[in-house]
Image: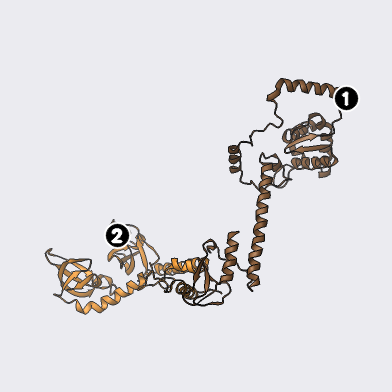
Chain colours: A brown, B orange
Amino acid sequence: MTFTSKESRQIIEQGMRELFPRILPSRLQEARASLLHHLNMTKDDFGHFPSGQPKFDNYCSQVVKSLKATGDMTTQGWRWIWSSVEQPVEQAHTWSMFMDDLDDLLEDEVEETPSLYNLECEDTVIRLVASTPCFGKVAQAETECQQCPLFDLCIEKKGEVRQAKRAAKTARGEALELASQAGYDLSGVKPPKAAKLHEITEYTLKSNSHCIVSGEELLAGDIVYHIPSWGLVNKTIGESYKALNEI
Amino acid sequence: MNLLTTSDVISYANSVHYALHGSGLPFEAEANCSDHIYNGFSIQVISDLVNGDLVKKQVREHTKQLKAQMEAMYSTFEIGTPVKVTKGSKDKRGIEGFIIHASDADQGSGKALFIYDVLTSRSCYARDSATKVRLPKPGERDILKDTYKTCEALASSFSSGTEVYLKSDRYQTGFVLQSAHLNPNLAGNGFYQATIMWHGASKKSTHILTELEIK
């Protein structure tokens, strides 16, 4: 028997509402496993995407999102917290006393968010990043990303990359504008792959030649630029490419 | 500015080289430039001066065409096809020469080929199955043509009794025992050669005329 998306979300929401006030806070993987156990179902019961991934994780994320919107739940990284626990005053009092005693007993041994990796250790982070090819490409809605210990760092990195890209785009625009003001439209010019733009060199011409980009004649005595594995370009175009290369 | 053909590339590269260095493009193979895509001009230098992608593409296409041409020649064992000897004794194996003559093998099937390497003056007979086609080195086919021409032009000078020495070893001197002639086993093909009796060694050997110099 398969459920529609709506039915699946309803089942999951109902299950969460019954179960989560009792078991949260908890890490999301454990919470999901408990939920399946509570519903007496398996991931297969909710069907699979064409890629083979189970739909259950996705439905869970959607329901959590709606519970967060209503204020019933909050999340901290990959930790789920139930925020509308209504405990009888007396029971809550007993519970808090018990927790205080437990804290006293365990003191240093209790950690708030136990993790397999110590992300305060630089070596660990370096090693983790090196073994994570997708680092910096976080998709915040993806369950896999949310479960990743590098989730927060990845978001930070993605932001940096995006900022650098934006700066490069602006600088590129300025360089193209410089050429455009001199009457050269470089936006449609595609340098050959072999062109060594980083080795662009200034020369004073010893005899006449031609600009490879604009086709105009370059005269002996002119100051031009040579782009290895492409050709000669006039001063304006050369300076634009030099600026583009410095981005 | 659109560069399309190999002549466009040579012309622009030459103008850039003049403009930057005050001299024309350097040569890789000046005298003999057969099968060289840019008439003997250095491919490396050209690739640095003009669109490197285009140079790479042109070189690739040129090699492809040359390969197809050589394969067609080898399929009929045409005289002048560049081949490499891949089997046989240590002396033969590795010779990279040209087919000078092809005839039916005396024993078994296939062809018997006479192969001559114009660069090292080594030669051998080999069965066609012991050879494979190869691409001619730049200038090599020009040297082959020159060798035919020179041998023909020198034939009248190498008459019996003429004192000669071996170009590869100036101290080896002798005299022409049998004047310039074509190898009778090659049915009119091949280069003019002469049989020389060497002084002091009391032995004779036959050489094509470009290997010898008249004293």
Residue at mark 1 shares a chain with residue at mark 2: no
Picture coordinates of residue A82 (x, y %)? 81, 34
Q: Note whether residue A2 is visible.
A: no
Pointer 1 with pointer 2, Cβ within 8 A:
no
Between A18 and A4, the one nearer to me in the picture: A18
The residue that disc 1 covers is A89
The residue at 64%/68% (across/down) is: A178
**Label annotation for residue B92:** 2
Name the image quarter holding the C terminus of chain B.
bottom left
Closer to the eye: label 1 or 2 = 1
Chain letter of the residue carrying label 2: B
Using the rendered view, name the quadrant where residue A181 is placed.
Answer: bottom right
Picture coordinates of residue A244 (x, y %)? 60, 62
The residue at 65%/71% (across/down) is: A180
Is residue B170 left or right of A1 when viewed as pictured? Answer: left
Residue A153 position (above or below residue B22):
above
> Disc 1 versus disc 2: distance between alpha carbons?
103 Å
Is residue A151 left or right of B167 when viewed as pictured? Answer: right
Q: Amino acid at mark 2?
A: Lys
Q: Note whether residue B39 is visible.
A: yes
Picture coordinates of residue A127 (x, y %)? 58, 40
Q: Amino acid at mark 1?
A: Val
Chain letter of the residue carrying label 1: A
The residue at 33%/72% (across/down) is: B143
Picture coordinates of residue B152 (x, y %)? 26, 78
**Label annotation for residue B118:** none
Neighbour class for label 2 at 10 Å: few (<14), some, many (≥20)?
A: some
Neighbour class for label 1 at 10 Å: few (<14), some, many (≥20)?
A: few
Using the rendered view, name the quadrant where residue B81 is placed.
Answer: bottom left
Secondary structure under tag 2 reads: loop
